[in-house]
Amino acid sequence: MAPRRNESGTTVSELNLGSDVEPVNTPVGSTISIPKAMQNMEKWRAKRIRIQKEIDQDYTNRLAAFKKKVDEHYQSEVQKASDLNKQKYERLIAALEKRTACHEKIAETIESLREDSAHIAMLLDAVYAGREGLASQSAKDYNNQPEN
């Protein structure tokens, strides 16, 4: 037959449970009265509920802090993107204004050249008409000369 275990005589109060629930001073393995056990269970249940609430509150606080941090980062990134787009639009507007100014200057130059070419054409027509008149006059004078 196997030898029986010697009961050590340690009590529940001697065990370090690390709680604020008062342990019952009864030897391990001895019976506890039911009302006392129910009272002890209620204390443990209350402690468990309190700890769960603390954990839930801590989780809620940390989650709120994380959400706030994410929102701040998101707002920062949105602001950066907005600033970048604003700079791009400002550069694009400046380039379009410069392009429009160049087009207007080209149009003015073309109009000036058109007026100059019209003046040159008028001068050439006048010179041609004058030379034609002189040539006609010379031909008439040559034809009207007496024959010697």
Image (cartoon, grey):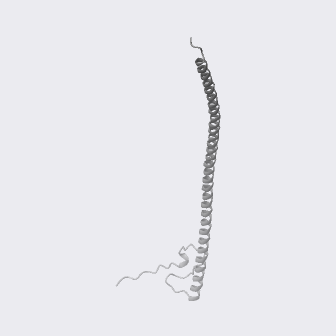
Quadrant of the image containing the C terminus: top right
Q: Is residue 130 left or right of residue 6?
A: right
Residue at (54, 82) in percent of width and height: 26
Q: Quadrant of residue 131?
A: top right
State the count of labels. 0
Residue at (40, 83) in percent of width and height: 4
Q: Residue furthest bottom?
A: 34
Residue 63, percent across and down?
60, 66
| Residue in front for this viewpoint, 83 or 113 | 113
| Residue in front for this viewpoint, 32 or 96 | 96
Residue 121, percent across and down?
62, 31
| Residue in front for this viewpoint, 113 or 48 | 113
Q: Quadrant of residue 52?
A: bottom right
Quadrant of the image containing the N terminus: bottom left
Check the image and report above or below for 12 versus 102. Answer: below
Check the image and report above or below for 148 versus 95. Answer: above
Q: Quadrant of residue 74?
A: bottom right
| Residue in front for this viewpoint, 59 or 143 | 143
Residue 50, percent across and down?
61, 75
Residue at (54, 86) in percent of width and height: 32
Q: Residue furthest left?
A: 1
Residue 137, percent across and down?
62, 21
Residue at (58, 17) in percent of width and height: 142
Q: Residue furthest top?
A: 148
